[in-house]
Amino acid sequence: MHIINWSIERPPKAVIEGFRQIPSAIVSDSQGRQRSMNSAMKPLYSGARVCGPALTVKTYAHDNLMLHKALQIAQPGDVLVCEAGRYTEGALWGDLISTSAQVKGIAGLVLEGAVRDRDDIAALGFPVFCT
């Protein structure tokens, strides 16, 4: 069963801007290393950076339906953060949905799962971090 939370409380823009220049490792350390992603998480391409309010998503192997739904709900500047059960045998994200996300103004994607179309996503300049 999927559960959708329609009321997402986002932090003030000033708070987001305050975090923009702080490395994620320092943010994690300052929070007692809580709310940190799997150490296998890597940028899809060199130089990718992202900062913004997290719109969290839970999905399952071979099922990117909730990523599509999150893309509908997301506001410009949001970062989609998806836990996909560490499944890496099939991609849940690629260049077409990256293009849609970029057009909508989504800041980036953090996916505990597989992504395809690395070169095309890098050419778009859409920040993606994945396992």
Image (spheres, rainbow, N blue to C red):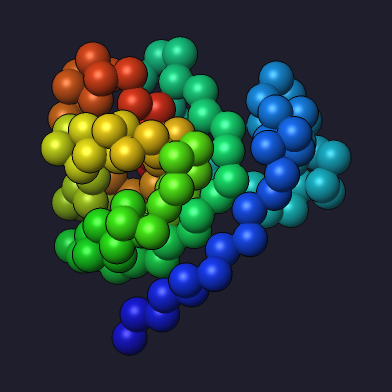
Image position, residue 95 (x, y; %) = 17, 33
Side of 64 where 73 appears, left or right: right
| Residue at (17, 51) in percent of width and height | 90
Tell me if residue 116 can be seen: no
Along the viewing direction, whichever of 107 and 24 lies nearer the viewer: 107
Number of numbered discs = 0
- The answer to whether 70 appears left or right of 114 in the picture is right
Rendered position, 25 above or below 58: above
- Kindly identify the residue that appears in the image at 18 percent across and 62 percent down: 62
Quarter of the picture containing the C terminus is top left
Image coords of residue 6 (percent x, y) = 47, 71
Up-down: is 97 above or below 68? above
Residue 121, horizontal then vertical, whole percent: 24, 25
Quadrant assignment, res 128: top left
Q: Is residue 30 visible?
A: yes
Left or right, 90 with respect to 107, comes to: left
- Quadrant of residue 94 in the image? top left
Q: Residue at x 49, y 44 (%)?
A: 78
Q: Is residue 76 left or right of residue 120?
A: right
Q: Is residue 109 above or below residue 112?
A: above
Q: Residue lying at the far bottom in this picture: please name it.
A: 1
Percent position of residue 61, x then y: 24, 64
21 versus 2 height, above or below: above
Of 102 and 25, the residue lying toward us: 102
Q: Residue at x 44, y 20 (%)?
A: 48
123 or 70: which is nearer to us? Answer: 70
Q: Quadrant of the N terminus?
A: bottom left
